[in-house]
Amino acid sequence: MDYLEYYNLKEHPFSNVVDNRFYYNSAQHSEALSKLKFAIDSKRGLAVVIGDIGTGKTTLARRLLEELDEEHYEATLLVVIHASVSSDWLLKKFAIQLGVENIKNNKIDIIGQIYQRLIEINESGKKAVILIDEVQMLRSREIMEEFRGLLNMEMPDGKMANFVFFGLPELDQVLALDEPLKQRVAVRIKLTSFNEEGTKDYIRHRLHVAGSENGLFTEEALQRIHLYSKGVPRLINTICDNALLEGYLLKKEQVTEDIIDTVAVDLGLKPESSY
């Protein structure tokens, strides 16, 4: 037996693996999605989502991708996993994801192929959308200039390609490497952590999706989780997952505030303030 069986859960409710089934449509995430869809549908070109570690940028990116149906959008998501990315590699990646065939090796030729593919996409009635996560890692003036060049491709009704950048606060500094590109940001969204009520609702939502019919956390425990996590979703998940395991090992029917305190010590977390 593990804590899933003990607490009658269908699956782990607090995994940090992005799973759209557990997506929590908070007020700020709902507003962010509306603004991003507006930027895409009106072909504004460049939208930016900035947030601290663990605030849900990747979750939002995957949710947006899921909502861009294939009938109306040619959409793709690229996650930057290392900083040593060249502009040539990036352009080839864009070409592949946009469906360009027989990609050339010369950068000028690749840009031409991308341009022709964007024309095809737009003439088919679709909108081309490229979501890029962890953009703060692309610390290259050359790459920022390439983005600007792609954004210069226009049709009478707007930009041919729509980019949505997701990244940490350092993304502002990366955009500043090319001031004309920074000035092209049409929509800028800042994600913040949850307030106490948001934290509680987030936890209850994930428990409900996982099959919980009863409150597994006491009200005091929920307050402590917010205190230690400061409302950051990733930390909330980590605390709750460990707390359920601890509660199971102690054979507790509910997770109480003392369990949260124990878990926080184990995780090396300190409260923002104390009672």
Image (tube, rainbow, N blue to C red):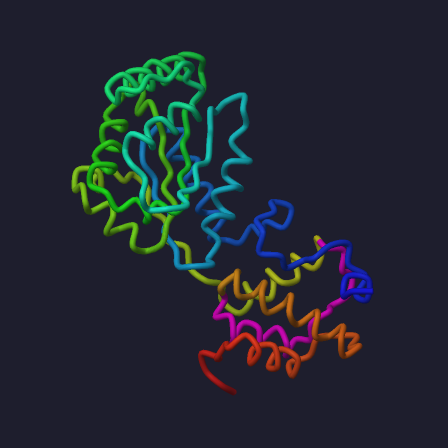
Residue at left 79%, top 75%? 253
Residue 107 vs 208, above or below: the answer is above
Q: How far across and how far down the image is residue 224, in percent?
A: 57, 77
Residue at left 31%, top 43%? 84
Residue at left 44%, top 46%? 32
Q: How far across and how far down the image is residue 251, in percent?
A: 80, 77
Q: How far across and how far down the image is residue 254, in percent?
A: 75, 74
Depth check: 44 or 56 in front?
56
- Residue lying farthest to the bottom in this orientation: 275
The answer to whether 188 appears left or right of 8 in the picture is left
Marks counted in the figure total: 0
Residue 159 vs 190, above or below: the answer is above
Report the quarter where the N terminus lies: bottom right
**Which region of the structure is painted magenta?**
210-231
- Residue lying farthest to the left in this orientation: 179
Residue 257 vs 22, above or below: the answer is below
Depth check: 45 or 142 in front?
142
Residue at left 39%, top 59%? 52
Q: How far across and how far down the image is residue 206, in percent?
A: 65, 57
- In magenta segment, residue 21: no
- In magenta segment, residue 217: yes
